[in-house]
Amino acid sequence: MKKVLVTGFEPFGGEPVNPALEAVKLLNGKQIASYEIISRSLPVARGRCIASIVEQIAEFDPELVLAVGQAGGHMEITVERVAINVDDFRIKDNDGNQPVDEPIVADGPVAYWSTLPIKAMVDKLRAGNVPARVSNTAGTFVCNHLFYGLMHALACEGNKRRGGFIHIPYLPEQAARITGQPSMALETIVRGLELALAAALTTTQDTKITGGTIC
Ligand code: PCA
């Protein structure tokens, strides 16, 4: 059976859990649109997370790769449009790195687009009653770093497999501790990821519907 690799990050920034890892663990071994889902964890570490996903791609030979990360403060599941070639870390990663304005790939392109149908994915989530939107920035921390590294690796192979990134909100148990932050139940996040994967696997030409912002 054809495979899909879904990754989730380990906890970081002092949090005991990362909803991305909790959610992707629940997808491991499932079947979506005749594809087998393989989920794996990644370290929140500059460089090492890219090396790890590249190894996982070599091991499983997936048709599609979806990376998932926590975005504290987000109210919806956000499907990322673009990864940019810069590391500008506001906090240290789990290895203690804190680069400022450094390229992820020296002499790499400024940015890579997701090669997933981001509009169709958002549409499918909303139709399934899961709050979602397109996001035009994955930040400048480890998630953007991994997203850029992933898209660079896929481009270097000739884009024979598709890839992209999704950010998800805090879990209610995290928001209850931090206070004043939005959250989403784990079961809703998991259902959202399943819908997003189903849309990505069954859509080759993205839907032309607006997902932009004014500023
Ligand atoms: N979120 C962070 C890094 C790991 C994660 O889950 C980010 O958005 O960069």
Image (tube, rainbow, N blue to C red):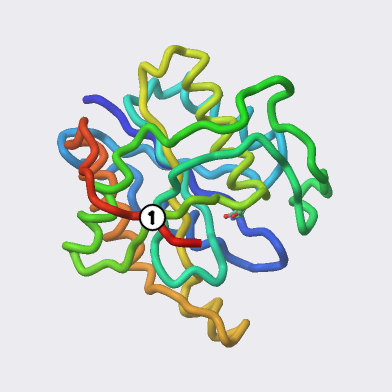
- Rendered image quadrant of residue 16: bottom right
Vertical arrangement, residue 166 with respect to residue 35, above or below: below
Reading the image, the residue beneath label 1 is 212
- Rendered image quadrant of residue 110: top right
Q: Please name whichever residue, 42 or 162, is drawn nearer the observer in this view of the structure.
A: 162
Q: Residue at x 55, y 72 (%)?
A: 73
Relative horizontal placement of residue 56, taking residue 208 as reference (left or right): right
Quadrant that contains the N terminus: top left
Q: How many marks?
A: 1
Vertical arrangement, residue 154 with respect to residue 67, above or below: above
Q: Please name whichever residue, 126 or 3, is drawn nearer the observer in this view of the structure.
A: 126
Relative horizontal placement of residue 158, taking residue 31 as reference (left or right): right
Q: Position of residue 49 (x, y in %)?
A: 63, 37
Q: Residues within 10 Å of mark 1 (few under 14, many from 20)?
A: few
Q: Position of residue 9 (x, y in %)?
A: 56, 50
Q: Residue at x 59, y 87 (%)?
A: 179
Q: Ligand 1 quadrant?
A: bottom right
Q: Residue at x 16, y 38 (%)?
A: 33
Q: Residue at x 59, y 47 (%)?
A: 143
**Three-letter amino acid code at the position of disc 1:** Gly
Q: Please name whichever residue, 8 or 118, is drawn nearer the observer in this view of the structure.
A: 118
